[in-house]
Amino acid sequence: MGLREDILTDPVSSLEMRTAITVSGEEPVRQVAKRMRQSHMGCAIVVDAHGKPVGKFTERLYAKLMAVDPALAADPVAKHMYHDADVISQDASVTEMVSMMQAKSLRYICVVDGDGKVKGITGQKGLMRYISEYFPRVVMVQRMRPLVGMDQPEGA
């Protein structure tokens, strides 16, 4: 099969995933931001006592909070999180994930298992790696063209 068929049938679990930063709602904003920075992640998933996502906290949200009042960094993250964690089942198709990401203008998405617990994070990067596997010679080994040489005319 080709990319067109596979993207319709392959599950989200076939994409490359990163380990999600999961935090409780009581954790201070400052600590969540520190963990995000250390892990080079742009978001953290806020989970309940059973490990199920109840919201998310992003670097963009953190920047907005700090612009308003740096003292807000001491607040619990649940007070400032987005209450939609933007989750998708690991069994959903890649096409469903892309549609959801486009509809909500998302860069990443939280993937959950059959029990609704966080399995990982994927998104634009995972999707690009998935697509590049279909075109390895074109995407990964593309020859660089030399710059304009002395034997070629320069100009518009």
Image (cartoon, rainbow, N blue to C red):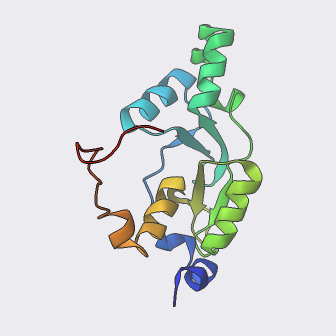
Which of the pair 30/43 is nearer the observer? 43
Hey, which quadrant is residue 18 in on the image? bottom left
Could you tell me which residue is drawn at 57 percent across and 68 percent down?
A: 113
Which of the pair 110/148 is nearer the observer? 148
Please, which residue is most extreme toward the left here?
A: 150
Which of the pair 93/120 is nearer the observer? 93
Could you tell me which residue is drawn at 54 percent across and 80 percent down?
A: 3
Which of the pair 98/56 is nearer the observer? 98
Please, which residue is most extreme toward the bottom here?
A: 1
**Residue 16 in view of the camera:** no
For the image shown, how many numbered marks are present on the structure? 0
Could you tell me which residue is drawn at 71 percent across and 55 percent down?
A: 102
**Residue 43 in view of the camera:** yes
Residue 143 vs residue 74: left or right? left
Residue 104, percent from left and from top: 74, 50
Asked if residue 98 is positioned above or below residue 32 in the image, the reply reads below
Residue 116, percent from left and from top: 63, 64
Residue 130, percent from left and from top: 46, 68
Asked if residue 43 is positioned above or below residue 66 in the image, the reply reads below
